[in-house]
Image (tube, rainbow, N blue to C red):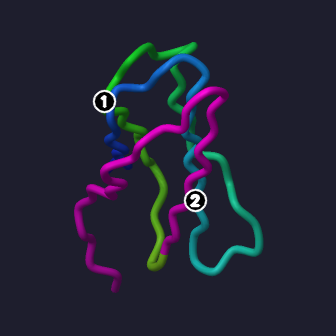
Amino acid sequence: NLVKVTMRPLASGESIAIEEKRDNASSWTALGTVSYSADGAVTEKRFPVDWRAKEFQLAMAISGTATMPSVTSLEMLFSEENFI
């Protein structure tokens, strides 16, 4: 299971932070960040997910100095389990 964010190539000073909330939790939890300073001019980053939930929410915060990132998609790729 993973969360994948795709974007136009990151430029200097740009970053995207991904957060998640599971099963109506009261607060957001950081999932990970993709940034030019750490990852370079990437167009995709995958964040592994090792938790289980019946419901989930994803959020992202984009930031930049001279320019802002251009996100093209935020996806959750998972396998379904039957809850008994």
Circle 1 Cα neighbour tier, 10 Å, few/some/many (<14 / 14–19 / ≥20) = some
Q: Is residue 40 on the magenta stretch?
A: no
- What residue is pinned by disc 1? 43
Q: Quadrant of residue 81?
A: bottom left
Nearest to the observer: residue 9 or residue 6: 9
**Residue that carries the numbered disc 2 in the rendered image:** 20
Q: Quadrant of residue 35?
A: top right
Q: Residue at x 58, y 77 (%)?
A: 23
Q: Position of residue 61 (x, y in %)?
A: 61, 50
What secondary structure is marked by label 1?
A: loop
Residue 9 or 58: which is nearer the viewer? Answer: 9
- Residue furthest toward the bottom? 84
The residue sitting at 47% across, 71% down in the picture is: 53
Q: Nearer the viewer, mark 1 or mark 2?
A: 1
Q: Seen from this angle, which residue lies furthest right?
A: 26
Numbered tag placed on residue 59 in the rendering: none
Instruction: Inspect the magenta stretch and tell me whether residue 57 lies in it.
Output: yes
The mark that comes first in sequence, 1 or 2, is 2
User: Considering depth in this image, is 81 or 6 the residue closer to the camera?
Assistant: 6
Judge left or right: residue 83 versus residue 17. left
- Amino acid type for the residue under numbered disc 2: Glu
Q: Position of residue 17 (x, y in %)?
A: 59, 42
* Image coordinates for residue 37, horizontal then vertical, percent: 57, 13
Is residue 59 toward the left or the right of residue 72 in the image?
A: right
Q: Residues within 10 Å of mark 2 (few under 14, many from 20)?
A: some
**In the rendered image of this protein, does residue 71 appear above or below residue 15?**
below
**Which kind of residue does numbered mark 1 sit on?**
Thr
Q: Is residue 55 above or below residue 3?
A: below
The boundaries of the magenta stretch are 56-84
The count of marks equals 2
The residue lying at 61 percent from left, 22 percent from top is 13
Q: Is residue 8 left or right of residue 70?
A: left
